[in-house]
Structure formats: structure tokens, C-alpha cells
Image (cartoon, grey):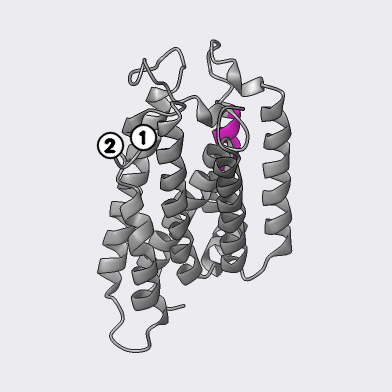
Amino acid sequence: MDNLPAYVGIVFALTAFLTIWIFYKATRRSILALILLFVWLILQGFVSLTGFYTNTSGMPPRFILLVLPPLLVIGILFATSPGRKFVDSLNPGMLTLLHIVRIPVEGVLLVLSWNLVVPTLMTFEGRNFDIIAGLTAPFVFYFGYIRKKKKLNKKIILLWNFLSLGLLFNIVINAVLSAPFPFQQFAFTQPNIAMLYFPFIWLPCCIVPLVFFAHLACIRRIFRHPAPGR
């Protein structure tokens, strides 16, 4: 995508690194998790640079190789005893703070739409209101997990997680159905092609799965514990 300003890719790459760094902090500094995530980024980066994902004519789309492995890992973590033990060991406050990355992601999507590589409906000028989750995350983090007195009620934190999860599902569905796959439904004049190129493939293969997982882990913790806690 040589027509894009260089700063767009740089900002997005830094956002991906920030997502991994905050998740690393949430794991209480698990070096193994950090290494696995960076290996995954590097692997997908090399694959995308070959143009592998730009071939969208086949079924199932090659794009599934970006999203299916992370979803399988998440499923295994919640389905197995060691996996659940890992999930329960995570810092819910840092998992909540992780959602601030949704702010720069939305900024990048907006610039990408100006450059005609994603449709406007994928931005907050269209159908995407995911930035609300990013803007409210610091408040939920502070009043839910840092403040000593009068913390947010766990029901409020739970509601925020479910609503933010709904915002995530909204943009994911619109993004997939706007891509130039055989089942495309939206944005035929300006399809979502940026997500097929480096470094923007890191959004579906890393940032979105981590954001999704962070919500699920926090929701599980709230159901298991009467107070949000740290």
C-alpha cells in the first residue's frame, strides 16, 4: 500500500506493540506470552508481505488463517483447566486498560478511509462506535480497579464489558462483510482492503483477538468474584 502516508503504518504498528505490552503486564509479565505474541506478529507479517492474503477469490478465504488460530487458542484457554487457571491469574485492571488501544485504532481507520482503503462505515463517521469503549476504558480502570474507596459496582463493570463487546462485534461484522470476499455485502465501491496488507493485518490477527479475550476474561472474573479487585 505504497500510496499511504508512512506515519499511518507506523502509528498502527506502535498500537499493536502497545496492545501486546499491556497484555504482557496483565499476564503479570509472562515472558512466554510476550514471546508467543511477537512470534505470531512476525509470522503473519512475513506471510502478508508475500501478498498471500490479497487473494480473496477462494473459499474459505485465506483471511481465516489470520483469525482462526487466535480464536482456537482462546477457546482452549477457556475449555481446559490449565487454561482457565491462566485466565484467572490475569490482572483485570490491566485487561480493562488494554481497551485504550481502540482509540488509536479508530484514528488509523479514519485515515485509511480518507485514503480509500477501508469504507467510511468502518469509522466513527459511519457505523463504528468502538471508540466509545476506548475513551471510557481509563475511567473504568481507575474507578473500578485503582480507586481505594467507592469503586464502581461490579454490575456496572460487567455492563460496560458487555456493551463494549457489542461494539466490537459490530465493527468486526461490518469489516468482514465489507472485505472483497465472495460473501461481501457492503461497501462495493470502497471495500475493506487495508486489512489484507501489512501491518494492518495485525488488527484481525492480534489486536482484535486480545481485545475480545480481555473482555471474556474480565466477565469470567466478575462472575466468579463478588468484587472487582485487582
Whether 6 is drawn above or below 151: the answer is above
Within 10 Å of the Cα at label 1, are there few (<14), some (14-19), or many (20+) other Cα atoms?
many
Q: Which residue is mark 2?
A: 127
Q: Position of residue 42 (x, y in %)?
A: 72, 41
Does the magenta portion include 210? no
In the image, 116 versus 209, the foreground residue is 116
Q: Position of residue 26 (x, y in %)?
A: 56, 67
Q: What span is in magenta?
A: 65-70
The image quadrant where one finds the N terminus is top right
Give the crowd class for mark 2: few <14, some 14-19, many >=20 residues within 10 Å: some
Residue occupying image coordinates x 44% and y 59%: 100
Query: Which residue position holds label 1?
Result: 122
Measured as percent of width and height from the top left, residue 106 is found at: 41, 46
| Residue 175, quarter of the rendered image | top left
Mark 2 vs mark 1, CA separation in Å: 6 Å
User: Sequence order check: which comes first, mark 2 or mark 1?
Assistant: 1
Left or right of 111: which side holds 15? right
- State the image quarter where residue 7 is shown: top right
